[in-house]
Amino acid sequence: MKRFLALLCVAILAVTMAVGVTQAAVPGITDNQVTIGAFQDQSGAAAVVGINMRKGMEAYFNWVNARGGVNGRKIKFIVEDDGFQAARAIAATKKLVEQDKVFALVGTLGTPGVAATIDYIMEKQIPSIYQGTGISALAYPPKKYFFPVQPNYISEGRIVATYVVDNLKMKRIAVACEQTDIGTEGLRGVREQLAIYKMEPVEVVNFGAADVDFSSQILKLMRAKPEAVIIYSTIKPAAGFLKQAKVMGLEAQFLTTYVNADPIQMPGLAGDACVGLIAPGWVPVLGNDADSTKYLEIYQATYPKEMPSAFAAAGFIAGEVFCEGLKRAGKNPTREGLIAAMESLRDWDGTMAKGITYTPEFRSGKASMYFMRFAKPKFEEGSVEVVSDWIKLKI
Amino acid sequence: MERGINNERNGNQGLLRRIAGTGLSARLLLGAALIVLPIVTAALGRSYVVYLYSLVMVYVIVTLGLNILTGYTGQISIGHAGFMAVAAYTSAILTGRFGVPFSLALIVASLLAAALGLGLGVPALRLQGHYLAIATLGFGVAVGQLSASWDKLTGGYQGMKAPVAAILGFRFDTDLKYYYLVLVLTWLSVEAAQNMLCSRPGRALMAVRDSEVAAQAMGINLAKYKVTAFAVSAFYAGIAGVLHAHLTRYVSPYDFNMGVSMTLLSAIVVGGLGSVPGSILGAVFMTILPHVFSRVKNLPLILAGLSLILVVLFLPYGLVSLPLKIKSAALRARARRATKSGNA
């Protein structure tokens, strides 16, 4: 009996050591599994986003795993709930990295958590793909282990400026910006891109996030006679600005950020003043095309009869981009190999992910957006029409 | 009934003395255990848990502070995270932007929180019950809004970085080193609270809580003690805020929102109102719970709510009174058996 026990101990030891050795080779990679993880708010202020993003990712990974995984390895995705708090996101990240030994972080969510874990992730050299936040600190300056997908306001501002100059053929461009990160970063992007065309804004006006009166700003703009006015703000002041501009007779092509491209809220707040407004989008609109059908099919295989939200689409895209990188990293992926593979993406299209580009110097990921126009003063069939193809960011 | 409550309260004090106030050997043992704990944890391959220990102790300090105000003095505060936020930002700005040494920043930031506590304590003299709750709620919300919108100073919603804490050139740059810094400060905070509460000021605070009229009749200056309780409580929250900032090395409005204030309040109720060990138990419970169940959807919130209800219903003196409750139940059962056999 004693001898049997001793043998058993030796056997267990040998097995654990063998497992330990393969794990030590590349963290999170075994012969048939890749372990990845993320912190996503499931119970706090951004739970609506976190829960749906998780659904999108899980649906995509289920589909990939049902087809044998990536290069023969199935994907195991661990979600830690951080309650939208930095302190808990740090604990979650450390747990994922040190205990679960994840290969990469995919789809981490929330400005506080992402901002608080940048230094740790850089120090531990963990590839981090897709962060659910628009902070530009991730892409400017570029960071080796960070691959943001969601557009930040700087690259969005550059794409909007490109669209106005190249597609609308307008030269007199003014910017109205809210004094928050949306406004300052959006303005920076517009300026950077116009500088490439050797142009600059004809006028820039500022307002506060809680302002309700924009008359002095609109008068200033009317004197500058702009052809296009880009409004960089959250949805409430943007709608208020549009309404007042209509009353005061400021005639120009209005554009705004993707954050405000809400087909229900925008007409609700601005009424008929939103007709003609153009805004970019980065998550493809669901239509009758092959990609939309495929996306719905994949999503509904896990969540039958449920329509995916925009956040689920974001999660889906996170999953797609990671799996493409993993595929390109080859049969024996390493963390450095994954990074090299990610940097080989050039204007890559997946099912929902479109126009993804990474280089060692360029880390905005989403290098293209399409534009849509509000056509009707309330939300109904055809109230928002797509007016452009994918517009690429010129770098 | 009155008598029962008093017994349980006295029992609490006894337990308290047993846990933290007893002889030197018991304390040395506890101290040694706390010193060895993170080393053992790291050796077991759970080094990230050391970070959690520090986080728990940060919450022990602020919970203790809130208990001095609410549990001992009977003044409610549902904006306590606001004091943490003020101190966290102050320390991050002082050390990060102006190169002020950490130890000085810790003192300045905590004193600033205490001063704000003093400022809030003065109008609070005229307020009681719901009104005081609303006033402190307003303070918590205002600090949150201000730190989010004053982005030149605080970095707004993107938050700001806090540098590694360093004392006399020694950098607390790993979770293990930082643990010992937090341990020392937590130990000092607990000792200080213990000593204060077991001496004249502590008894005065409890007298204010139990009956303001009786307290005044005994010559206790109500205004002085209430305002002091606010200041001391905010000072504790300030220390916790600074330690939180340099533990996560990042400060944002989200880490000190209303949810955190409510968690602190839950912690003192679950742990035990008017009890130092109760504060510690409550903070440990409410901090560890979400981490243990962080992979189960929504369970932490449900468990936190459930524990709160169960404690209020069955353990009105908190988790800390659980051993006593069991003991007295056992005693009663034995007494019943004794009378039965006597009758027979």
Image (cartoon, helix red, strand yellow):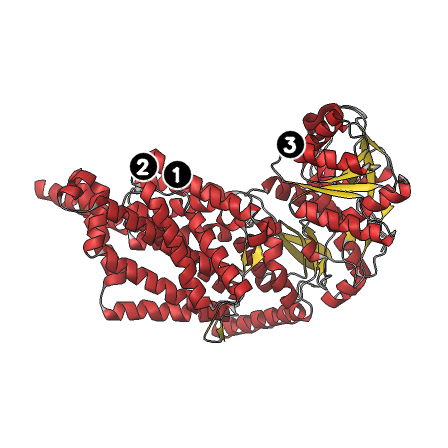
Mark 1 vs mark 2: tell me if same chain.
yes
The 10 Å Cα crowd at callout 1, few under 14, some 14 to 19, many 20 or more, is some
Quarter of image, res B136: top left
Label 1: chain?
B
Q: From the image, tell me which residue sits under label 1.
A: B135
Would residue B66 be found to the left or right of residue A231 on screen? Answer: left
- Where's residue B143, x and y in %? 48, 46
Label 3: chain?
A
Amino acid type, residue under disc 2 in the picture: Leu
Would residue A250 be found to the left or right of residue B320 on screen? Answer: right
Secondary element at tag 2: loop
Q: Is residue A31 visible?
A: yes
Measured Cα–Cα span from mark 2 to mark 3: 38 Å
Measured Cα–Cα span from mark 1 to mark 3: 31 Å
Amino acid type, residue under disc 3 in the picture: Asp
Which numbered marker is on residue B127? Answer: 2
Relative to A12, is A328 above or below? above
- Where's residue A359, x and y in %? 81, 61
Secondary element at tag 1: helix
Quarter of image, res B1: top left
- Nearer mark to the viewer, of 2 and 3: 3
The 10 Å Cα crowd at callout 2, few under 14, some 14 to 19, many 20 or more, is some
Amino acid type, residue under disc 1 in the picture: Ala
Secondary element at tag 3: loop
Q: Quadrant of the C terminus of chain B?
A: top left
Which numbered marker is on residue A22? Answer: none
Q: From the image, tell me which residue sits under label 3.
A: A213
Q: Earlier in the sequence, mark 1 or mark 2?
A: 2
| Closer to the camera in the image, A215 or A30 | A215
Label 2: chain?
B
- Nearer mark to the viewer, of 1 and 3: 3
State the residue at coordinates (55%, 63%).
B97
